Image: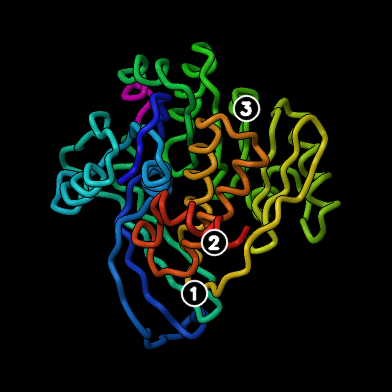
Amino acid sequence: MTTHLKKKLVVLGSINADHILRLEHFPHPGQTLHGESYQVAFGGKGANQAVAASRSGANTHFIACVGHDDMGRSIKAQLNKDQINTQAVACIDNETTGVALIFVNALAENCIGIASGANAKLSKEYVQTQQSLIASADLLLVQLETPIESIIEACTIAQHAGVRVVLNPAPARELPEDLLKLVDIITPNETEAFSLTGKTIDHESDAAEAANILHHKGIKTVVITMGSRGVWLSEKNQGQLIQGFNVNAIDTIAAGDTFNGAFVTALLENKTPAQAAQFANAAAAISVTRQGAQPSIPWRTEIDTFIAQHA
């Protein structure tokens, strides 16, 4: 059982049903492969990050949309079991819940295609109905699987209310300056950092250069996740590598989402960004040793035990 904080986290983002097929390798064009296993799990970057935050101990409120279908009802029920406040999760008539089709290869890499479904209905107008919720938050966490104009609206509301904004710029895409100027903390992986800065990250010096480009766009804190190597944390052009943990990875589907949810939870507990990154590295390390998206996300007691064992 998590111990919820008084500080409030609001997550705005997507909800998907993940259809996961495990293969020896990704298929080539025109090729058909027999999978090793098939699984349906609850996912979507927004939902994954909300679950990761709540299981880490955050007082989590979620703004999202599901379809008017059995999958949407099941996902919302599971979010409630994960102690997430779902009053702002809307059920959209005549829409299906979002779907992600995921291939996972023998190296634990993944390849994903998404049908937005109800996620596309998370409109600017709906965000405006949740203005008081966003303005009452201590931190707003957003990603990029819902309409960009809605994300900008949420971040604008947050900035005007003095609420910290954390953007996980995933999936990778170019972003308007209107959004970046509203962001306090950005958490790209190497691919997303390349999309935002044009910098290929092979070494720590590359990460530092990419972070400085993002600082020049007005973002105070840059956290570039680099898989098992850890994360490059840069504040005011001063960067450091926060080492990752060595584990036997079998599935990286929700690693980034787990990191983000745990990271913001630690920030809300008044940990420094460096301490928060280390805590989040531990949560992500646990998640890659398990299959699926939300089923892989650890609870707070598991994270604390893992950190104690690797001290």
Q: Tell me the CA gap for discs 1 and 2.
A: 11 Å
Q: In this orientation, which residue lies closer to the viewer: 239 or 103?
A: 239
Query: Where in the figure is residue 263, as x and y percent of width and height?
Result: 54, 42
Secondary structure, mark 1, is: loop
Q: Tell me the CA gap for discs 1 and 3.
A: 33 Å
Question: Which amino acid lies under the numbered mark 3 shown in the image of this protein?
Answer: Asp
Residue shown at 49% from the left, 40% from the top: 143
Magenta-colored stretch includes residue 13: no
- Please report the bounds of the magenta region as a residue range: 123-127
Secondary structure, mark 3, is: loop
CB under 8 Å between discs 1 and 2: no
**Image quadrant in which the C terminus is located:** bottom right
Establish if 101 lies above or below 271. Answer: below
Name the mark on residue 184.
Answer: 3
Give the mark nearer the N terminus: 1 vs 2: 1
Q: Nearer the viewer, mark 1 or mark 2?
A: 2
Question: Which amino acid lies under the numbered mark 1 shown in the image of this protein?
Answer: Ile
Residue shown at 42% from the left, 30% from the top: 9
Residue shown at 48% from the left, 35% from the top: 142
Q: Badge 1 is on which residue?
A: 250
Give the mark nearer the N terminus: 2 vs 3: 3
Q: Tell me the CA gap for discs 2 and 3.
A: 25 Å
The total number of labels drawn is 3
Question: Which amino acid lies under the numbered mark 2 shown in the image of this protein?
Answer: Ala
Q: For the stretch drawn in magenta, what is the main secondary structure?
A: helix
Name the mark on residue 297.
Answer: none
Give the mark nearer the N terminus: 1 vs 3: 3
Q: Badge 2 is on which residue?
A: 285
Query: Where in the figure is residue 189, as x and y percent of width and height?
Result: 63, 52
Establish if 245 lies above or below 304. Answer: below
Is residue 84 found left or right of 302 in the rendered image?
left
